[in-house]
Image: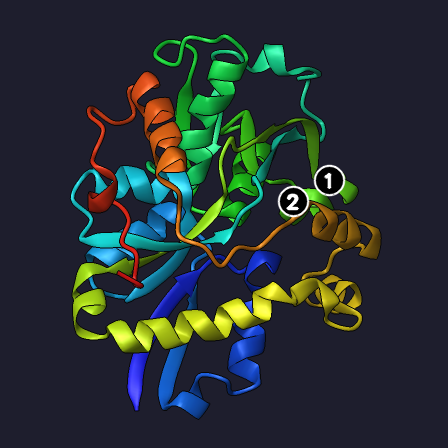
Amino acid sequence: MKNVRIGGVPEHFNYAWYLALKQGHFKQHDINVRWKDYFGGTGQMTQALRNNEIDMAVILTEGIIKDISEGNPSKIVQVFVESPLIWGIHVANDSSFKQLSELKGQRAAISRYGSGSHLMAYVNALHLDWNPTTDLQFEVVKNLDGAVDALSQREADYFMWEKFTTKPLVDQQIFRRLGDCPTPWPCFVIAVRDEFILKEKETLQTILKIINTITADFKQIPEIDAIISERYQQKNEDVKAWLELTEWSQETLKASTVDAVQNQLLELEIISEKWPYDRLVTNLDD
């Protein structure tokens, strides 16, 4: 049996993987998939790919493109979620901040450098016409729990994270959301270490076929909103709103999308040069 290590955030986006594992779809094909939750998000997963701790990751598009261009020995093999990720911009509920403009120059809590919370702070700064060089400060908090502590204890001023994941914290009046910042590209892709692609291409293709079959019909799963609501402790109305906005994908990442992401990262001086498409993305059908 082939052993395959996959990482992802412990969020509703990845429930399809849980279903595939629970229903034994991979083992039917003699594949032993071991899933690992990464509470630290993309920055933690890029390091895990580099360290050969996992073979595959369900990871934020902008984060993995940046890290591959900095030497991560991996490639993007397909889009996982086609729709944008909507980042909520949060402050502590009892904070004095009332509008986004007041966050200029304040401390942004981030899980890690190179993470989505880090990179999207730059995108948000661009949207608000801030100077990313002088108007951004960062405080590393590792994960969502760390952000709760940092904002509550005034060690950081605001925090960007997927709005539906943080909605329970807003409902509990721990966070207050001042606004949203959607990614201008598909949010999640599947990235795989080069070595695994080379040695286990057929295994990889089988895994993708299984997960793509589930995501293609994900919204038609009976009572899926109620199931996700209970598992992730979210209000049913919020899950329904999230499902309306979310579209999964079974396709290769487009060259035009890679170009758009790199242009944005280059403009923000997050990367120093653009890389050719085939150094970032591989098409397994070729």
| Residue 63, x across and y down, in percent | 36, 41
Q: Is disc 1 surrounded by few (<14), some (14 to 19) or many (20+) residues within 10 Å? A: some
Q: Is residue 252 above or below residue 133?
A: below
Tell me whether the residue at label 2 lies in contact with that at label 1, contact meaning CB atoms closer than 8 angstroms.
yes
Q: Residue at x 53, y 16 (%)?
A: 127
| Residue 50, x across and y down, in percent | 21, 55
| Residue 141, x across and y down, in percent | 44, 40
Query: Which residue in the structure is indicated by mark 2?
Result: 166
Q: What amino acid is labelled 2 in the image? A: Thr
Q: Residue at x 28, y 77 (%)?
A: 202
Query: Which residue in the structure is indicated by mark 1?
Result: 170
Circle on res. 57:
none
Q: What amino acid is labelled 1 in the image? A: Val
Q: Is residue 112 visible in this depiction of the protein?
A: no
Q: Is disc 2 surrounded by few (<14), some (14 to 19) or many (20+) residues within 10 Å? A: many
Which one is in front, 189 or 40?
A: 189
Residue 137 lies left or right of residue 203; in this view the side is right
| Residue 230, x across and y down, in percent | 75, 67
